[in-house]
Image (cartoon, helix red, strand yellow):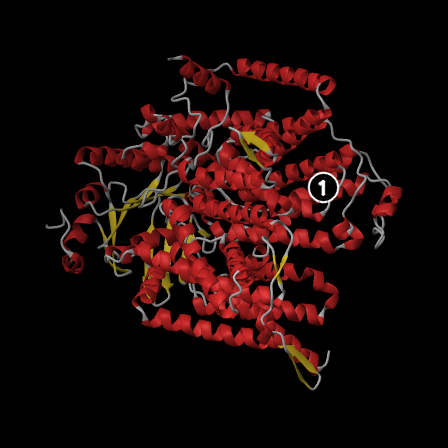
Amino acid sequence: MNKPLLRAEGLTARFGGLTAVDAVELSLPVGQLAGLIGPNGAGKTTCFNLFAGRIRPSEGRLRFAGQDIVGLRPSRINQLGMARTFQNIRLFGELSVLDNVLVGFHGGLKSNFLSAILRLPGYVAEERRMQDRAAEIIELCGLTRLRDEPAGSLAYGSQRLLEIARALATNPKLLLLDEPAAGMNPQETTGLAALVRRLRDELDVTVLLIEHDMRFVMKLCEHLTVLDHGRVIARGAPHEVQQDPAVIQAYLGAGEPEGVAP
Amino acid sequence: MRLQSLLKPGGLLQPGPLPPASQSRRRDTLLTIGACLFAALGLWLLENHASGYVVHLSCVGAIFATLAVSYNLINGVTGQFSLEPNAFVACGAYVTALLTLSPAEKEASFILEPLIWPLSAFSIPLLPALVIAGLLTAFMAFLMGFPVFRVRGDYLAIVTLGFGEVIRVVANNAQSVTNGPLGLKGIPHLTNLWWSWGLLAVCLFFIVRLVHSSYGRALMAIREDETAAEAMGINAFWHKMLAFTLSAFFEGVAGGLLAHLITTISPTLFTFFLTFNLLIIIVVGGLGSTTGAVLAAFLFTYGGEWLRVMEEPMRILGWDIPGIPGMRMVMFSLILVVMMIFMRRGLLGSHDFSWRWLAALLGRRARP
Amino acid sequence: MDAAQLTQQMINGLTLGSLYALIAIGYTMVYGILRLINFAHGDVLMVGCYFAWFGAVQFGMPWYVALMGAMVLTAALGVLIDQGAYRPLRHAPRISALITAIGVSFFLENLGLVVFGGRPKAFARPEMFNHIYQWGEVRVLSLSIWVPILTAIILAGLILFIRRTRVGMAMRALSRDLVTVQLMGIDTNRVVAATFALGSALAAAGGVFWAMKYPQINPLMGVLPGLKAFVAAVLGGIGNVTGAMLGGLLLGMAEIMLVALLPELAGYRDALAFVLLIGILIFRPTGIMGEELPE
């Protein structure tokens, strides 16, 4: 029986009087393309923040690749193999596309700063490897012709892709994508879905994504977890979840998003 | 049209898009070595043919350039707005001086309370003293870093300012170590063009190499978005520490050379005033640009002397204008405020020098 | 140290604390709305003192007229600085505004040095503040009694203003949520200007009392009190007016007590504020009364 890659038990986050995430249970097997959905304000991004270590849970347990990760720094969790993108794009605006991706490799750098300064052979070799890998990832995400542009000047869709490229550079086992398709047209969305599938098929990356574009989610995800008001209200295969009355109620209560109607 | 270029987002000296990086690193290295030899020749000429005043000024310029480049590493490259360099310069200056002054001179200076043992008993040559001072200052920065980097933004500024003040107060009160308000005098005048420019060269080597490496990218990432940098596996705390302690090292050594240039130091020399001057320099040069820091430091040193003219009585268009001492600093502050409003990016923005940058700049200017 | 000396020192602490409180309020109000540390605040205080000095010495006004005049003029200066130097940078990165504030601070200091020279000028202490009361062993300068009283009156007036007037309410609203208030059609610029005016006027009052206490003024007199008052604001919880008052009193007391109880450390009194600052940022970053940490 394969151990789940990410396992959350009773995960709770409270801010003052507000409980944003309430006793969430989640079990993500290796290699799955999973989705985390729910109406606005359901606590999805908060869950991501909990998983990635940006927020400390008020209660509950969190295990990643068999290791307890509660209380670890985000940088440490990333080095263990979990990468994420951000809902409001957080790129390094002044740095070029290439440099943004190269930054992703730094966490895995073995050479210390002295060998970097002195350009010792070990560092030079690592740098060359990083440059080569970066070029591959940029190619994979279709950003090659934008390689030297400052990240802040990119079109919105390209910025979203760059966020993914940068996260890929950290060599993750698990990739958390926060609304990757937001603001994309149907053509871009199809390209994105193909990319995500390639990530899983070719790079062995498990993907958990938050999305509001239901068509995208239904097509791509193999498993869905539905949140509402911080609690899990349904989970399962997309077509099951789609017909779950509790889910329909939650969405109808907040207004029906496109693509949910069976 | 002029104003338009002043408001250019990338800084005043922006050459436009660069030609792609050629693979001729060898050419770049040769050019750099050539430039160094050229500079060495220039220094030799200065030393043997220029007046003592110009030589002194050039030493000050190089020391300030070192300070600016170091300060720029933590403020401009890593984006941690801190106000403590005066503390590190003071530390380096005092430690070096206390180590190189002979026991006899120390006894003559410390008239209120004798200097503590073993400092009172020995003296060592300049180079080991500088290295020890640099290391001690870096260590002080290391200890400071733990409380300091728990906060961000404005708080970081105030906390580092506070540390600077604490150091000054300590220097003013620790009679048996620093000789309090009396300070140290009779420091041997050991600093010359070779020491000061040599330090600048070493500092530039380390910092430019660091900035143009993966570590430099990591530091800039922290500046751009610390949360995202952490999410990408960069331990922001340790990287800030790296920049901070490296900065402190060079600021300490520069302080030591400064002490051996002006031969008398006291706590009043290392007030927030010094930090403010460095701040103006790196802002004018462009926060984040090492090249800008160097340029601005020399601009400040030589230009400051020239501005001193403003403080002399002069005759303009038949009017006698009396000399106004202190107008220089008023002008500097005004320049800083105006720059922040209209030309926030400074001379070079956050760009740096490279041979192809220069080529592009010259190429663009050549076009009518 | 006996009871008499202790009483004396406590009164001194109260006086110094009141001065810090008056100055700290300006910092905390501006920070609450703009998230800007107004480095120039301490120097504005200095200018206020010179205004008062002019009034009293050059024009021979009675002290309360000079004080009022100074408060008004200093309020105007505060507004001028805001509209001239800070307003253009409302939407710039925060570092820019911070650097500008430092620039303005230095500008005022150096301008003061150029205009008035570095030598301190004597500041006449009005007669009513100059008596020395004596109860048993305790000797107290009347100024030390009056300052806390006058400060309390001024602060009570301030609290009334904040609670009861529309401008005051707008100030409180702005410090909660700048954007939303703008969307509601309130002219935020007016409110910010009023905040600067109020803070600067209070700082002028604090400065004048300070000048009466240590009866001399010089262009650099505002630097250290300004910094310490900022620390006081942080101690109390930056953004919180009551916190600034508490922080000011606390810091004043602590400083006096340090000097009184450990006279051999008296030279380090200026460092105390910063040691406390570092301590509070480590152990309770939101301050005594604060709720949120700046991002």
Q: Residue at x 77, y 35 (%)?
A: B128
The residue most toward the bottom is C136
- Residue A193 location, quadrant: top left
Can the viewer see residue A56?
Answer: no
The vertical placement of B246 against B361, above or below, is below
Please name whichever residue, B218 or C111, is drawn nearer the observer in this view of the structure.
C111
Can the viewer see residue C149?
Answer: yes
Q: Residue at x 21, y 55 (%)?
A: A39
Could you tell whether B49 is left or right of B273 in the image? right
Residue picked out by circle 1: B93
The vertical placement of A210 against B193, above or below, is below
Dot 1: element: helix
In the rendered structure, the residue with mark 1 lies on which chain?
Answer: B
- Residue B51 location, quadrant: top right
Q: How many marks?
A: 1
- The percent coordinates of residue A260 (x first, y second) are 14, 50
The vertical placement of A10 against A94, above or below, is below
The residue most toward the left is A262
- The percent coordinates of residue B222 (x first, y second) are 47, 41
The vertical placement of B318 against B263, above or below, is above
Local crowd size for mark 1, using a 10 Å CA cut-off: few (<14), some (14–19), many (≥20) = many
- The percent coordinates of residue A212 (x first, y second) are 21, 47
- The percent coordinates of residue B42 (x first, y second) are 66, 17
Please name whichever residue, B14 or B24, is drawn nearer the observer in this view of the structure.
B14
- Name the amino acid, label 1: Ala
